[in-house]
Amino acid sequence: MGKRTILNSKHLEITLKRLASQLKENHQNFENTVLIGLQPRGIHVLERLKSILEKDLGKDLVCGQLDITFYRDDFRRREQPLIPSVTNIDFIIEDKRVVLIDDVLYTGRSIRSGLDALLAFGRPKSVELLILIDRQFERHLPIQADYIGKQVNTLPSEVVVVEWEQLDGEDMVILTEIENG
């Protein structure tokens, strides 16, 4: 099984700082902006960006976590039932600029689920999408990110794995082949 490093720890940190800079450029003081990470892995991207931005801006940002389990189109098709995570949105998104954050964009189905789940909390003024890794190919839905950490060309037999120091021991993004293609 082949394995290739897409981003090592140093390059992942540089990528996150660049994404934070792009957000600052477009949202200035974040007065009317909220950041929402998709469960389970988008929240790790959110936490890193939040840390960088709050340090740079010198103020707390409004952030939340959104579980999309019950909004997934494959929810009832799995042999193993999905176990929901925690949604933590204790603020109003009505008329706010929302930045939806996830780790990998592949088919677009998770993002579609995230948009559906988000609307249960109100009608935002706008929604932007921030993705750490954009797989580019095999999109099933016409969804594209506003902020992209890195674009990679992948085959359907490959998977992008984002590892975080606090969970996996090291920050890195790898591309690996799925066993039995």
Image (spheres, rainbow, N blue to C red):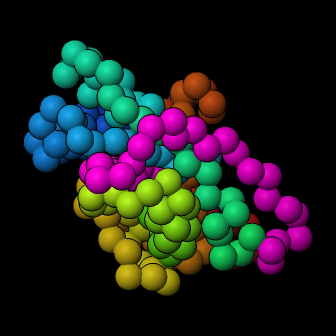
Q: Is residue 167 magenta?
A: no
In the image, 117: left or right of 47? right
Identity of the residue drawn at 52% across and 40% down: 89
**Closer to the camera in the image, 42 or 14:** 42
- Is 52 drawn above or below residue 86 in the view shown? above
- Is 71 drawn above or below residue 168 in the view shown? below
- Image quarter of residue 145: bottom left
- Image quarter of residue 110: bottom right
- Is 7 drawn above or below residue 160 in the view shown? above
Identity of the residue drawn at 21% across and 35% down: 31
Q: Which stretch appears magenta?
A: 76-102
Q: Is residue 173 visible?
A: no
| x, y percent for residue 134 | 38, 63
In the image, 139: left or right of 130? right
Q: Quadrant of the N terminus?
A: bottom right
| x, y percent for residue 62 | 37, 32
Magenta region, main secondary structure: loop
**Closer to the camera in the image, 16 or 142:** 142
Identity of the residue drawn at 63% across and 32% down: 168
Kindly give the residue lying farthest to the right in the view shown. Answer: 79
| x, y percent for residue 24 | 16, 38
Count of numbered labels shown in the rendering: 0
Identity of the residue drawn at 79% across and 59% down: 82
Q: Is residue 179 visible?
A: yes
| x, y percent for residue 21 | 17, 38
In the image, 97: left or right of 87? left
**Closer to the camera in the image, 62 or 78:** 62
Q: Quadrant of the C terminus?
A: bottom right
**Closer to the camera in the image, 117 or 143:** 117
